[in-house]
Amino acid sequence: MTGSPENGDSVTLDLLKHKMAQFAKERDWDQFHSPRNLLLALVGEVGELSEIFQWKGEVPKGLPDWKEDEKVHLGEELSDVLLYLVRLSDICGIDLGKAALRKVQLNAIKYPAKYKDEEASSTKHIHGTATTTEAD
């Protein structure tokens, strides 16, 4: 797969979807790209991504203490996860962008923003549920 957006244009999910479909077609890989196979490949890539962080503990935003080659490796593994996710959604006939926007809207309803003038509190998300604790 060659090519990247020229002159700083954003990469869209649609562009990635088309590139992944073309990549698979050129190699006659469509026969292997069942939802199950793509999901298992995605899970494997998430495992590889997890290995990068496994023994690092908490790391600050921007990864200031990471070497450049570690950041490049992270980018490669994040890309693998994204590409399999995009391919899986395409094969399943799901518009991933629209589904993600819908999920953000549902989450906004499920977890409404607090007003600034309310008492200080923090919301912790544990296993997909929210619990609120008062700040000291």
Image (tube, helix red, strand yellow):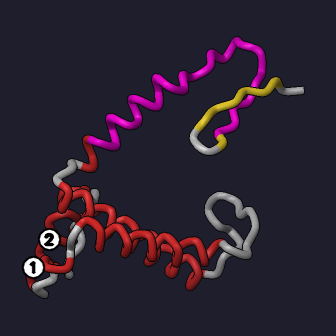
* Contact between labelled residues 1 and 2, with CB atoms less than 8 Å apart: yes
How crowded is the residue under tag 2: few (<14 C-alpha within 10 Å), some, or many (20+)?
A: some
Quadrant where the N terminus sits is: bottom left
Tell whether 122 sits left or right of 80.
Answer: right
Helix, strand or loop status at disc 1: helix
Tell whether 102 sits left or right of 30.
Answer: right
- Tag on residue 25? 1
Quadrant where the C terminus sits is: top right
Q: Residue furthest top?
A: 117
Read off the residue under disc 2: 21
**Residue 101 magenta-drawn?**
yes
Query: What segment carries the magenta color?
Result: 99-125
Kind of residue at disc 2: Ala
Q: Nearer the viewer, residue 75 or 20?
A: 20
Q: Nearer the viewer, residue 132 or 18?
A: 132
Kind of residue at disc 1: Lys
Q: Nearer the viewer, residue 121 or 127?
A: 127
Q: Residue furthest right?
A: 136
Q: Write down the quadrant of residue 16 in the picture.
A: bottom left
